[in-house]
Image (tube, rainbow, N blue to C red):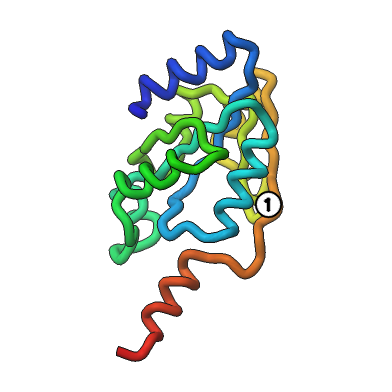
Amino acid sequence: MTRAEATAFADAQRRAGRRVVFTNGVFDILHPGHIRYLRQARALGDVLVVGLNGDASVRRNKGPERPINSQDERAEILAALEPVDAVVIFNEDTPDQIIKAVQPDVLVKGADWAEEAIVGRDTVEARGGRVVRVPVEQGFSTSAIVERIKALPL
């Protein structure tokens, strides 16, 4: 979805009495940790909107070798997942502007983020929403997968 479409979608869901949950990330090489995280996020409301870092944003945040998969490929894969109701790509370094646009009722981040460091927290709490930190699944990491692939013999 475009930012305008995601905003309209979230507004329509709220008008219908549904609780809108938002989370964001790179979701480059999907692994079980991602799936479990998205399921937990979706369980906190009625619809889940995922903000996806665009390619330029990923490069600025993770370095020139990332992402492995393009933003369109990552968005298509995420949109096909059962817990995900909408995907919106953002190109800023943080999801602040997309969170301000979507105005979620619940903002979800991994528990590896300190509460005061969660971008968008002020926006969500200002309108009576809540921020939920969910446990991070240990042993799963896109960066670790990339390193394992690089270490394979040629």
Task: Using the image as rendered, state which of residue 135 and residue 125 is in the foreground.
Answer: 135
User: Position of 56 compared to 39: left or right?
Assistant: left
Binning the other alpha carbons within 10 Å of mark 1 as few (below 14), some (14 to 19) or many (20 upward) gives few
Q: Is residue 50 above or below residue 62?
A: above
Q: Position of residue 16 (x, y in %)?
A: 59, 10
Q: In terms of image quadrants, where is residue 54?
A: top left
Kindly state the secondary structure of the residue where label 1 is placed.
loop
Is the C terminus in the top left, top right, bottom left or bottom right quadrant? bottom left
- Name the residue at the top extreme: 15
- Name the residue at the bottom extreme: 153
Q: Is residue 28 above or below residue 4?
A: below
Q: Residue at x 63, y 36 (%)?
A: 42
User: Position of 126 compared to 24: left or right?
Assistant: right
| Residue at which label 1 appears | 111
Q: Position of residue 70 (x, y in %)?
A: 29, 52
Q: Residue at x 33, y 27 (%)?
A: 2
Task: Using the image as rendered, state which of residue 98 and residue 83 is in the foreground.
Answer: 83
Q: Residue at x 68, y 36 (%)?
A: 43
Going by the numbered disc 1, the residue's amino acid type is Ala
Q: Is residue 71 above or below residue 107?
A: below
User: Position of 120 compared to 152: left or right?
Assistant: right
Q: Position of residue 148 (x, y in %)?
A: 45, 79
Task: Using the image as rendered, state which of residue 129 and residue 74 is in the foreground.
Answer: 74
How many numbered marks appear? 1
Is the N terminus in the top left, top right, bottom left or bottom right quadrant? top left
Q: Residue at x 45, y 52 (%)?
A: 27
Q: Position of residue 98 (x, y in %)?
A: 44, 30
Task: Using the image as rendered, state which of residue 67 and residue 86 is in the foreground.
Answer: 86
